[in-house]
Amino acid sequence: MANIHLLFKKEDIKPDKMVGKVAIVFDVLFATSTITAALADGARSVIPVLDQTHGREKAKEMRETYLLAGEDKGRLIEGFHPPIRTHLKDVVRDQTLILSTTNGTVALQNSSEADVLYACSLLNNEAMADHLNKHHNDQDLVMVCSGSSGHYTLEDFFGAGSLIHHLVKKKQWSLSDGAKTALLFYNGNEDHAAELLSQSKIGSLLLGAGMEQKEIDFVAQEGLWNTIPVYDRVEGKIKEWSYESSEASR
């Protein structure tokens, strides 16, 4: 029986320990939700970068059309689009999105030594569970919660619990104590996703800074899309899964 482990924050990632694993990264508010939405809305790919400097360096290398989007500690980066779906949905089609966020894109970069790396959110969790049960049912999974400033975050823990819930409905997995706890937490709160995300520390800070409630309500929707974002190791880009992208990710 394959195992499911859970890391509570990006600082817990040890790149050498990711080798041989299948990693699934969560940053529900908002990086992995934005990545899922961007690909569903027709973006060619998403490049997760460590910070705005890394993003601008990547932009200089681009030969195809691209958009820069990002935030730094919750503040919009000058010259970058806001990194949420409302602002990107009408402009991201056929673009490469270079995305810089405080936590999620860093977690993705730091997890890139995994044999296969996925970005997951509530928006695509059901499809991701079906995909993992079909294509990785004999491999160990590592759920990576991005967290914030060295602390775990409620919304990522909930997102990981949601994915585990959908995984174990159809297949037996051996769960670490962290994974079991995330599953129990999700099962006790699954009907209150938007409320829970809004009351989280990050959600409360964003709403207090002027974010509209509809942004959180949107990413709190479960199973909206069948999009499977997978990291292409050769190109350093996240693309929608296909048999071709699966080979490139290895």
Image (cartoon, rainbow, N blue to C red):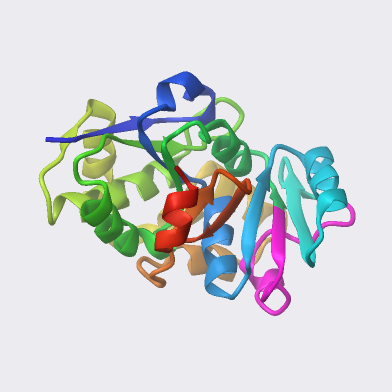
Q: Left or right of 92: which side holds 3?
A: left
Q: Residue at 44% of width from left, 34% of height from top?
A: 114
Q: Is residue 80 visible?
A: yes
Nearer-the-camera pick, 5 or 234: 234
Q: Residue at 26% of width from left, 52% of height from top?
A: 135
Q: Is residue 120 visible?
A: no
Relative to 1, residue 189 above or below: below
Quarter the C terminus occupies: top left
Instruction: Determine the residue located farthest toward the bottom in the rendered image.
Output: 90
Q: Residue at 35% of width from left, 45% of height from top?
A: 160
Q: Residue at 85% of width from left, 46% of height from top?
A: 56
Quarter the N terminus occupies: top left
How far across and how far down the image is residue 3, in percent?
Answer: 21, 33
Relative to 68, residue 168 above or below: above
Prevailing SS of the magenta stretch: loop
How far across and how far down the image is residue 156, in percent?
Answer: 44, 44
Q: Which residues are magenta?
A: 77-98
